[in-house]
Amino acid sequence: MKEILVKNVLAGALIALGLCFGGYFIYKGFSSYASKDRAVSVKGLSTRDVKADHAIWPLSYGASGNNLPDLYKYLEGRTQYIRTFLMNLGFKTEDIQEGSISVSDNWDSYYGDRRPEFNYTLSTSLIVSTDNVDLVVACQGKEAELLKEGMIVTTNSWNLDYQYNGLPELKPSMIEEATRNARTVAQKFAEDAQCKLGSIRRASQGQFSIEADEYQPWIKHVRVVTTVDYFLE
């Protein structure tokens, strides 16, 4: 009888111990599960102001007349004059490219009572494509000097293109800075919440954007935002 009682007590103790351990691991499981659900999502920003490293500057001009061969020869003379003008400003021969020539038959597109004075209009352009961005900036407005020779040359601001091609070299440092800024924000949040900042749960990188300065279009504003989720412990 005594042996049976001892066995029952021992079995009861083992069951109680098992329940205690089971409860502990269940508690740890729920605690761990709840901990995984505690996270903060933050954004990190990185910006740079950089100068364009390439410029494309088109100068358009034309001439009107009644004889196409003579008109073409006259336009060739203008092209040579404007090319020399650009080289005197400091541009190299390889910086200057000739655009295509377009021909307008003024009589063919004539409507109304007033007949066109000339049968044909030829239009073309010289295109400056150079890495010497500073020279392009300095020369803006100087094409007006051609008016002294009776040449009307148009260069519209929306056709003048300042480009920045150094983004691949800039990306790593900007991503690093944006991620570092995101962690700083997350760390502050964790401190305010009296938590410990854990490992990264998820991270995503936004697209890089390049925008021209409104008043100095050769200055580019580069921007990227990263989104990082951190576990909170």
Image: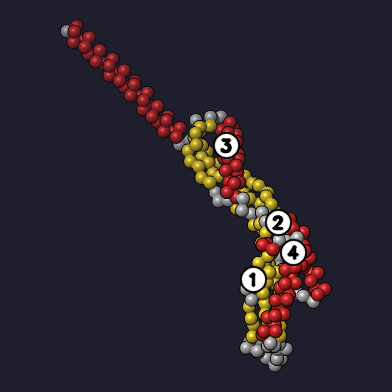
Residue 170 locus on image (x, y percent)? 61, 46
The CA distance from mark 3 to mark 1 is: 52 Å
Q: Nearer the viewer, mark 3 or mark 2?
A: 2
Q: Nearer the viewer, mark 3 or mark 4?
A: 4
Q: Quadrant of residue 60?
A: bottom right
- Three-letter amino acid code of the residue under disc 2: Asn
The CA distance from mark 1 to mark 4 is: 17 Å
Q: Residues within 10 Å of mark 3 (few under 14, many from 20)?
A: many
Q: In the image, which disc is placed on residue 183? A: 3
Residue tagged 1: 99
* Contact? badges 3 and 1 (CB < 8 Å): no
Question: Which numbered disc, 4 or 2, marks the residue that appears first in the sequence?
Answer: 4
Residue tagged 4: 87
Question: Which numbered disc, 3 or 4, marks the residue that appears first in the sequence?
Answer: 4
The CA distance from mark 4 to mark 2 is: 13 Å
Q: Nearer the viewer, residue 29 or 48?
A: 48
Q: Residues within 10 Å of mark 1 (few under 14, many from 20)?
A: some
Question: Which numbered disc, 1 or 2, marks the residue that appears first in the sequence?
Answer: 1
Residue at the image point whose x is 77% and y is 62% from the top? 89
Q: Is residue 34 rendered to the left or right of residue 95?
A: left
Q: Quadrant of residue 159?
A: bottom right
Residue at the image point whose x is 34% and y is 21% from the top? 21
The CA distance from mark 3 to mark 4 is: 53 Å
Local secondary structure at mark 3:
helix
Q: Nearer the viewer, mark 3 or mark 1?
A: 1
- Three-letter amino acid code of the residue under disc 1: Gly
